[in-house]
Amino acid sequence: MLYKFGLIHFLGRSLMRNYPKRNYPKRNYFKIFRPFSVLLSLGRLAQGYVRSINRRVRLLLIVLSLFCITLLIALIVVLEIDLNPFSNQEYYQPWDSTYRDQLAVGDIVFRTAYGKESRFVQWISGGEFSHIALITAVEPEIIVTHATTNDEETLPNQVLATPIEKFLSPTFAKTYLIARPEFLPDIERFYFAEMVAARVGEPYILKGREEENLYCTTLLEIPLQQFAPHLATQLSWQELSLPGVAGEYLFPDAFLSLPDMRPLLIDDQWIEDL
């Protein structure tokens, strides 16, 4: 048995030595697949570049979104775009002042409230105040009479008689000024106030100077024509050309320019103390 295996091994080695060798060409498989490798590399680079761009775009969109949200919040806060201070009439902080006993019938109250309407009036007029009223009673409580659109939700667009505690409440009023028209004698200020108070309940009419109107300033300007016509002509009307609001209109700050209009109280500080 061992002899047979030895013989087979010998014959095999002899055949291998005598068999002619062939030079088979060596194939460079890397060269064959090189184009595919390059394409694959380019694809990976492109994919990475796209991912990088996508990350940058997403980051940019996030930054822009945060900026827009911040800008919107700032506009709402600064311009009070969606604020209506008179939406809840039941809950408010009553106004009070140590100088309330020095106020008298015929004193004029200038006010700037919170909210978009007040800001709009300030913007188009260039003035400090957006609303005006007149003290028409001091006993048993101080009452101001004014023409308004939304001070009372249940009584919109009319002339109202409102307690001063509510009219100047810090909940509604941002700033205020009370002045005395000393160009009218005491008795005429009383009759002036009577004429204004008699119009409570009449409709609010926002029209130009040449049309029938009744809004906060003309509520005072109309009786002023009777008691001091020479001063009524000194009031500065402003020309507007806005959609739905065209013509000459009278704004609260015009009354502050009248001679002998004596400021008394501004934001709870007596003027003589300033």
Image (tube, rainbow, N blue to C red):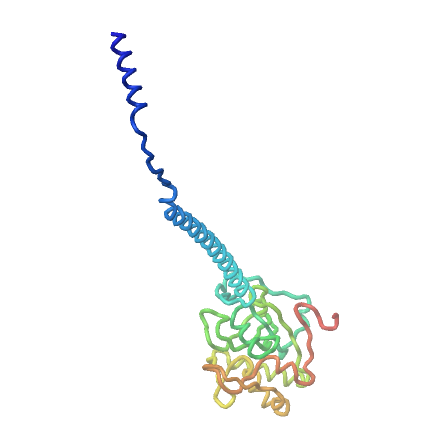
The quadrant where residue 137 appears: bottom right
Q: Residue at x 69, y 79 (%)?
A: 262
Q: Residue at x 51, y 57 (%)?
A: 63
Image location of residue 119, percent across then percent down: 55, 72
Residue 62 left/right relative to 225: left
Q: Is residue 64 above or below residue 262?
A: above
Q: In the depicted view, which residue is nearer to us: 106 or 87?
A: 87
**Residue that sits furthest to the right in the current view:** 273
Image location of residue 178, percent across then percent down: 64, 74
The quadrant where residue 139 appears: bottom right
Q: Residue at x 56, y 76 (%)?
A: 123
Q: Is residue 7 above or below residue 59?
A: above
Q: Which quadrant of the rendered structure holds the N terminus?
A: top left
Q: Is residue 96 above or below residue 205?
A: above
Q: Residue at x 65, y 68 (%)?
A: 267
**Residue that sits furthest to the bottom in the current view:** 230
Q: In the depicted view, which residue is nearer to us: 264 or 248?
A: 248
Badge count:
0
Image location of residue 73, percent across then percent down: 52, 61
Q: In the depicted view, which residue is nearer to us: 227 or 256?
A: 256
Image location of residue 20, percent across then percent down: 30, 29
